[in-house]
Amino acid sequence: MFGKKKEWNVLAPMSGSVKQIEQVEDEAFAEKMLGDGAAIVPQSGMVFSPVSGVVADITDTKHAFCITTDDGVDVLLHIGINTVNLRGEGFCVVVKTGDKVAAGDKLAEVDLTVLEKHGLSFDTPVLLTEPEQYEITHVGTGNVRGGSDVLYTYKKR
Amino acid sequence: MIEFRHTVQDETGIHARPAGALVKMAKETDCVCCMKHGDKQADLSKIFAVMSLGVKCGDTVTVEVSGESEQETAEKLKKYMEENL
């Protein structure tokens, strides 16, 4: 489990700009009701795994991914806001529940023009769902590259 | 233990936002809260577990609450579900 390493990285799942979780255009996320972390405002539709682990669940509507890291940390990736209403339109997922993924592996591709057409926010939060156990130590800023740049780091409390 | 059933009316089912609200309530209480859907069950304080139940519109779930404030907690969860799901 947790060896000597003190901090872990969560990669940006998409290329775009970093947004603090408190600024996300949805109060459930901004108030950290679903967990703590940060968001990306994507500029392109390729989605990469932010961590190495196992895909624990993908919603039927393809817009949310639950990934449990190799260390047992639960990470929730939610692409766009209110995208549940698209019922999968614009989302092409290339992994399935139970798949093992490495940080940076492609998970899906999203047609952002579909979100735009429906007037939905692109804000894409990446959350640690058990903030009682893990603390965010550093959040990136500015523009980041999906699947390679660090979105934030965390440590065990 | 208090148990109640609820049939989900929201056409998108139990998605991230309502799941988050339920998890927050479950974490705030001293009770053990569990949601059952078919043969699957989830600890209501774990967002992954709740989302993995895959509850859709028209599905009936059973919520079990046990602990000191079970009456109050069950009523709070039931009220939220009736108003939002």
Image (tube, coloured by chain):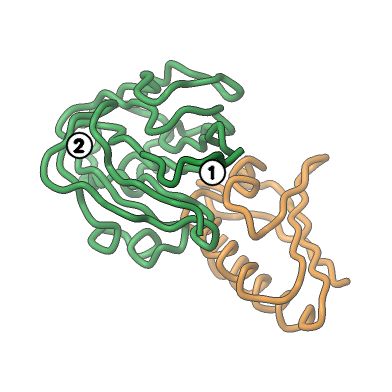
Q: Chain of mark 1?
A: A
Taking the spot 52% from the left edge, 28% from the top edge, the residue there is: A53
Instruction: Name the residue at the right extreme.
Output: B1
Taking the spot 34% from the left edge, 23% from the top edge, the residue there is: A104
Q: Are marks 1 and 2 on the same chain?
A: yes
Instruction: Name the residue at the front extreme.
Output: A4
Give the residue type at disc 2. Answer: Pro
**Which quadrant of the structure image shows residue B62?**
bottom right
Comparing marks 1 and 2, which lies closer to the viewer? 1
In primary-sequence order, the first of circles 1 and 2 is 2
Q: Tell me the distance, in whole angstroms, between the alpha carbons under discs 1 and 2.
A: 22 Å
How would you rate the neighbour count of disc 1 (Cα within 10 Å): few for under 14, some for 14-19, many for 20 or more?
A: many
Residue A113 in sight from this viewpoint: no
Name the residue that disc number 1 marks: A74
Left or right, residue A32 beside residue B6? left
In orange, which chain?
Answer: B
Give the residue type at disc 1. Answer: Asp
Q: Chain of mark 2?
A: A
Q: Position of residue A65 (x, y in %)?
A: 47, 35
In depth, the one of A4 and A81 nearer the eye is: A4
Q: Position of residue B22 (x, y in %)?
A: 59, 64
Q: Position of residue A78 (x, y in %)?
A: 39, 42
Name the residue that disc number 2 marks: A42
Residue B54 in sight from this viewpoint: yes
Label 2 SS: strand
How would you rate the neighbour count of disc 2 (Cα within 10 Å): few for under 14, some for 14-19, many for 20 or more?
A: many
Taking the spot 24% from the left edge, 43% from the top edge, the residue there is: A40
